[in-house]
Amino acid sequence: MPGSDALVTMIVPGRDIAAYAPAAIDSLRAQDEQRWRAVLIDDGSHDDTGAVFADAAASDPRFEVLHHDEARGLGAARNIGLSRLDTPFVGFLDADDELTPGALSAWLHTLEESGSDFVAGAYVRSRAVDGAYRVGRVQPWVAQATAPRRLGVTLAEHPDASANIVAWSKLSRASVWDDLRFPENVAYEDQIVAQRMYTEARTFDVIPDVVVRWRVRAEGTSITQGKDRLPVLRDYLAALRGGVRVLRGAGQDAAVAARLSLIVAMDLPPLRRIAAEHPDPAYSAALDEFETAMRALPEYADVNPDPELAAALAW
């Protein structure tokens, strides 16, 4: 494999994102920390994603390209990338998003200082406005999870960290993934993995540095923009429930209450709005069953949702 002096392997999966992949690739090349290699995984694309990835590898030996003839899903693509891991550290970047220029150095310097298992940074959303993608501010729940800077903490000490569930906000030591992989054949594969990372870590770090610009596609084609579809809703609710189950199994009562508070304030209101107009009664039934199950948990008594969080979804 190329990049024998690399410190970080970045796993970059993508499917039908040829329009956005060049920006993701350029964001890697623009890092002020250049000791990285990247595994670009074309997950069965029907557009020019594979060609974009191949061009990157042809011009820079730090890129390795894997092609899937048929889509296997984001979880499987990431797992295949993990099988190529040969560096001390590993991170993830979806190929329609972008790293900020100082992301790798911020992550690495933090872990070198702390010795923790992984570090989680802040992120912002990039949305289409008047034909161009514009970057928003750090959202309140992200700030609660990542600010102020904390080194060498546990989830018991910082339960609000459980809100930061996206894989691409984190850099980990390779050993974290010895016995950890992403669920496959489901959407929202990050949630259970993230909560396992928090509960199984010796210690972790959080930093307020913005490390990723998360693209909300104008055409609404990403998985996370399809919650009006019943199968996607079911995967979403299963992921939320699975994450809470991991926290409860680890005895992290404060983190369970924090996670439930965020779900009540931020996740449920837009789903209820969809359910009110959805033609399939099974959609409302699935949502009702989920809410009933969450209210039955003893930690629900400590739920304290912040009404400002739901309003923050506007940007």
Image (cartoon, rainbow, N blue to C red):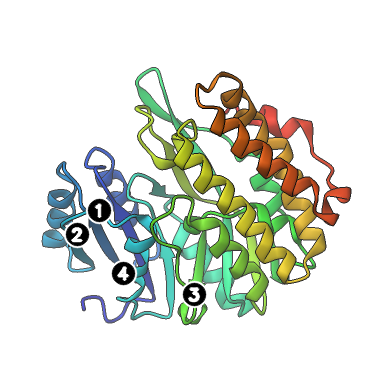
- Helix, strand or loop for disc 4: helix
Which of the 4 quarters of the picture holds residue 48?
top left
Residue drawn where x is 76% and y is 62% of the image: 158
What amino acid type is highlighted by mark number 3? Leu
Which of the 4 quarters of the picture holds residue 249?
bottom right
Looking at the image, is mark 2 or mark 3 earlier in the sequence?
2
- Helix, strand or loop for disc 2: strand
Residues 197 and 296: in front is: 296
Q: Position of residue 134 (x, y in %)?
A: 44, 29
Whether residue 146 is visible here, answered yes or no, is: no
Question: Which residue in the protein does label 3 denote?
Answer: 180
Question: Which residue in the protein does label 1 denote?
Answer: 71
Q: Which mark is residue 68?
A: 2
Looking at the image, is mark 1 or mark 3 earlier in the sequence?
1
Question: Which residue in the protein does label 4 denote?
Answer: 80
Looking at the image, is mark 1 or mark 4 earlier in the sequence?
1
- Helix, strand or loop for disc 3: loop
Residue drawn where x is 49% and y is 80% of the image: 179
What amino acid type is highlighted by mark number 1? Ala
Quadrant where the N terminus sits is bottom left
Q: Is residue 156 above or below residue 54?
A: below
Q: Are marks 4 and 3 in contact (CB under 8 Å)?
A: no
Q: Residues within 10 Å of mark 3 (few under 14, many from 20)?
A: few
Q: CA distance from mark 1 to mark 3?
A: 22 Å
Q: CA distance from mark 4 to mark 3?
A: 13 Å
Left or right: where 58 falls relative to 101: left
Q: CA distance from mark 2 to mark 3?
A: 22 Å
Residue drawn where x is 42% and y is 71% of the image: 90
- Helix, strand or loop for disc 1: loop
Q: Are marks 2 and 3 in contact (CB under 8 Å)?
A: no
Q: Are marks 1 and 4 in contact (CB under 8 Å)?
A: no
